[in-house]
Image (tube, coloured by chain):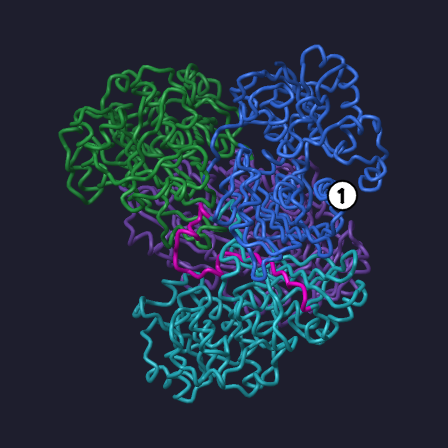
Chain colours: A purple, B green, C cyan, D blue
């Protein structure tokens, strides 16, 4: 199958290219970049030299539609909506890795992203691409909203408890999530300048991060009712990885043994590893895994859940490929089965 | 005044030496190391070359008592008790930077440190050296138990609320604390081997960290009753700094403005900086500051408090010097007034 | 083909396992560790959970010979000789990743490694496993001495010039080589303790590093005569990668164009990428590539050559697999064709 | 004495402020920033909160001249010339930390900095502020060109040999210099974006770095004749520090003992530490030291010299203060005598 990557020069685009190079059923035939059109792909991704002979091209949906059957859109939010719509009209299957189709409500989108939604009709049609939750719907979707990195790490941790009706709605779910810097994208900024991040740990956007409504939307689906959520993200001085610690209030006491039982819902999931030792981002580096560990607490009415993902893989490109595999009826782990990268 | 540092080759010993070199009223006359006795101090601390001409010597309390008036003990836990007792008997003022005198109860000590307490009588006499809370008692103490690094970062954050009777005892205080690797000491181990820590974030000792009973002991003093506490520490890939995020349950709604008012109790504290932006360890590097920021939450019955300290300064050597200044009747900030170190 | 990895718990062992999991023709059937025998493999390599169900076992050559056809020995120097000899006697093909068979002279070995050589007879038989130089000999070898990481980065850089007779023997070859910390192995030490390495850059073993005689041995083969060599290695605060800058004295002036022509000898090499921009370890991370850039200098009688490798891949496990592929008559790049890992 | 810092929001400005806060004879009365005029200083330097109550102001030389006696200019190159000239005309003593007055020849400046020199007359008058070489001239100067960071690390290493006539002019001086990222300034760029620098090592501007003519100018003064120089700089994934390795060709054989004797010329220098172990940037962090180690080589006609400085201190702000002390007739080390910062 022929693939186009719209917005190929960022970290997400690069990660798609890294992973797709190992995928047996696809060929990337088109990579776009408005800023670097005309340059060879490897000029922006020297690590890919020898793997692709592609030249970056401008974003021209009509032209691209001739060369590709399946479209990954890796543009930044607010700029993805229009091309997504164009490719949809051209009958292509599309996975959008931006935030543009993650929120179901265009009003909510406009409040949080300070921009009108340009393709609200598609919001009814798009599927939220979290395979462990929405696998069946994904299989028949034409448009996938690929989940955000923080939401992925959070939602996979809480899903079994919320679905099982174990949440205490009277107390807050506390999400303390630490992300590597590639999560902030490839455009330089003061906050991501090396000497500012290195030897530092920066909490940011407390209570105002745009991934919060996305987390709440999905938790509401899981639990049947909107929970109270506190979400504190941090910029961690590493390249990759999100470690999310969730303090989840329960409406009943749960021993360690019962906690482990709740997570058995994941026992057939290829990309979820239930582990005894605390999760560490270094064990999932470069992989599509979500490593989950969970710990009982003294009075047993709170469980501490720690998830580790690679923000560029399970938090972006890897999950997108997992979604593509489902949409195409292929083995879900195709092209994603390599071990991680340690140290 | 003449100073001895017992256990001078670790990071805490080195930091005492760094800071005391700037202190106008003292002279370090004795540095000990059982392993490196006979070697010049700078062989173990090359950065101090040119600042001290001292030779490391074996720990001989009688001999040291002749050369020094004031003793800092920077040994590891269980090995500090005996020398502390010896120096006390010799009439010296002592600040113990180990954990050996932090817990008031020898039974609790023995449970958590798996070792009998060898000087339980001193536990009645020692003062817990958190100046912002126990300043007056510190002034007349002969023996100070210098607080642990995690407890310092936590206790300074919660003290004004607990003291003001604002804690909701029915919910848990959640402490999510990320520490630089120097907090683990200078002895190499698998966990602190560079490729294991770098590009990683390791939660550890969840619910079992030895700083937890110390935190609970003090919070009980502040609040009048033992709170419920969850404490999750992490090894962060930086050299220095602890960032502690506390989700503190309140028994009343507090707006941002009222939260700020609660913290006004600190308005005359030299080493506490109340800031609007989220605290970052990079702003306190090398200093005795505790930077505190706090944030209201939607229903206002939880406050998010974020404290940043340098684990080697306010979390160890700097606080010890602050305590020494109080014990000697000197200006509390003597030798500690330099700005931090950025980047 | 069935594979045994002798010494599987270190970084080299882990990297062999990472790469072999992607190799279509092999199955790892045996992993040994004297220290951790009886434990599941993933207890020492959590990142491999889900990829291998193996249990670590003690090193028993007879027993292992029943389960495996091909042996990788990833033990530390001086401890590899004996098992290598045992497996050779049992008729197995062996790749030794230690230093024990790299030097052709047992006397030189004994001088540099301060230990008698226990299998000197094998030194006549073993082939130095640098495929770009010794490909044909490797194909028929039973025992490969896998090159050291620094030698690999250096030798691939100088080979075309030395072979072409362009070296000025009257001046020194200067090798300034910076290595990531995984090159020092997985055993913790004071030098590799995180706070000592982080924010530092440590030159070490100047003129005394054990890779120097290995480099000189091979350069003598290439050039027909022993060159003068200065070799300065550094411990770099990164996990992986060696960047080697070579200031190579020439016996004639060479313009940039002529320099590029000399490197054309590599034009059919899969794992050498000739690049225009200065080499960077970040572009070869996780790959078997050696990226080479070279620069003319004002009077053109010195060329600056910069090579980048991943010390665990082209500098160890990847090159070993490349050698295995050659020994087995397989496609040389089998299992090694994935792109790198950036960022 | 009253001090103004022109361009106070960068790393060099911040470091001047850090160090001047400890200086007994001065008071900073004015800090400028055209971009952030009107904001409190600590908004751009949170680590300085509590140390200065200053507000950033626009650059108005007349106005500043009323408030300050001594001017540090920490602007970027090409933008410093005009204000320097203005302050000179107003009779102030000025230390320029930019590159604008380092090169004696305006033609050379214009070639390397691609900009006409706007104050060429001052080039005859300015003194190159390397105290260990030009101490006497500095004492009476009105304008100091503060040396570049790479030149400082290089020149202090080679000076004793060049001055002693020991250089072999027929061979190249090879300078392999690794710099922390703060040396690139505080403005974000693709090259200094965290994920690009972290886990990487980037050689850059080989043969074309603007510090090369500065190095050559001074080496010509030291040696009486222009040497041949190869200069390879690297971006190192640390915040601070330059480690410079110099392979210096000698016109005679020098044993280790004789090498050490040559360096005795520095025996009374406060800020040069001659050490036996290889220099490491971690030992000079935060200090004005230049740590120098040197090693003989087999045929003794090359010496390997390794210098370590903190690029922001001895490579910028610290050296500027050392120059100020000399210009004012004060103790040379005033305000600069604190030990470093380890780890």
The one nearer the camera, A228 or A291, is A291
Q: Quadrant of residue C332?
A: bottom right
Q: Quadrant of residue D252?
A: bottom right
Helix, strand or loop at label 1? It is helix
Q: Is residue A269 left or right of residue A87?
A: left
The part of the chain drawn in magenta is C169-196
Q: In this view of the protein, can residue A126 be seen by the observer?
A: no
Q: In this view of the protein, can residue B224 be seen by the observer?
A: yes
Q: Is residue D253 left or right of residue B148?
A: right
Please tell me whether residue D300 is drawn above or below residue D205 in the rendered image. Answer: below
The one nearer the camera, C108 or B241, is C108
Q: Position of residue D331 (x, y in %)?
A: 55, 22
Please tell me whether residue A140 is drawn above or below residue B6 in the rendered image. Answer: below
Examine the structure image and report whether residue B317 is included in the region drawn in magenta: no
Q: Residues within 10 Å of mark 1 (few under 14, many from 20)?
A: some
Q: What residue is rendered at 67% in x and 14% in y?
A: D68
Q: Quadrant of residue A261?
A: bottom left
Q: Chain of mark 1?
A: D
* Residue indicated by mark 1: D213
């Amino acid at each position: 199958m022929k693939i186009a990557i719209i917005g190929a020069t960022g970290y997400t685009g690069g990660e798609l290219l890294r992973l797709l190079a190992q995928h047996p059923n696809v060929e990337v035939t088109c990579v776009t970049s408005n800023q670097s059109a005309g340059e060879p792909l490897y000029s922006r991704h020297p690590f890919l030299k020898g793997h692709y002979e592609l030249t970056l091209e401008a974003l021209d949906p009509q032209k691209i539609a001739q060369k590709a059957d399946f479209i990954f859109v890796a543009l930044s939010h607010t700029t993805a909506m229009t091309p997504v719509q164009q490719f949809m009209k051209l009958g292509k299957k599309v996975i959008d890795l931006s935030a543009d189709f993650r929120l179901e409500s265009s009003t909510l989108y406009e409040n949080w992203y300070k921009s009108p939604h340009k393709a609200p009709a598609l919001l009814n049609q798009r599927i939220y691409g979290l395979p462990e939750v929405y696998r069946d719907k994904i299989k028949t979707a034409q448009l996938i909203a690929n989940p955000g990195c923080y939401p992925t790490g959070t939602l996979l941790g809480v899903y079994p408890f919320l679905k099982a009706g174990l949440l205490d709605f009277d107390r807050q779910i506390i999400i303390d999530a630490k992300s590597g810097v590639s999560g902030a994208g490839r455009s330089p900024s003061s906050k991501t300048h090396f000497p500012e991040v290195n030897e530092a740990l920066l909490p940011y956007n407390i209570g105002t991060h745009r991934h919060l409504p996305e987390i709440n939307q999905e938790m509401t689906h899981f639990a049947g009712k909107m929970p109270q959520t506190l979400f504190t993200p941090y910029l961690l001085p590493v390249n990759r990885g999100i470690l999310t610690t969730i303090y989840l209030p329960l409406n009943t006491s749960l021993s360690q043994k019962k906690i482990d039982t709740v997570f058995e819902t994941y026992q057939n999931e290829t990309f979820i590893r239930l582990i005894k030792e605390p999760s560490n981002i270094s064990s999932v580096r470069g992989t599509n895994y979500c490593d989950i560990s969970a710990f009982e607490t003294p009075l047993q009415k709170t469980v501490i859940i720690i998830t580790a993902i690679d923000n560029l893989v399970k938090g972006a490109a890897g999950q997108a490929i997992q979604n593509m595999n489902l949409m195409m009826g292929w083995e879900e782990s195709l092209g994603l089965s390599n071990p991680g990268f340690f140290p």
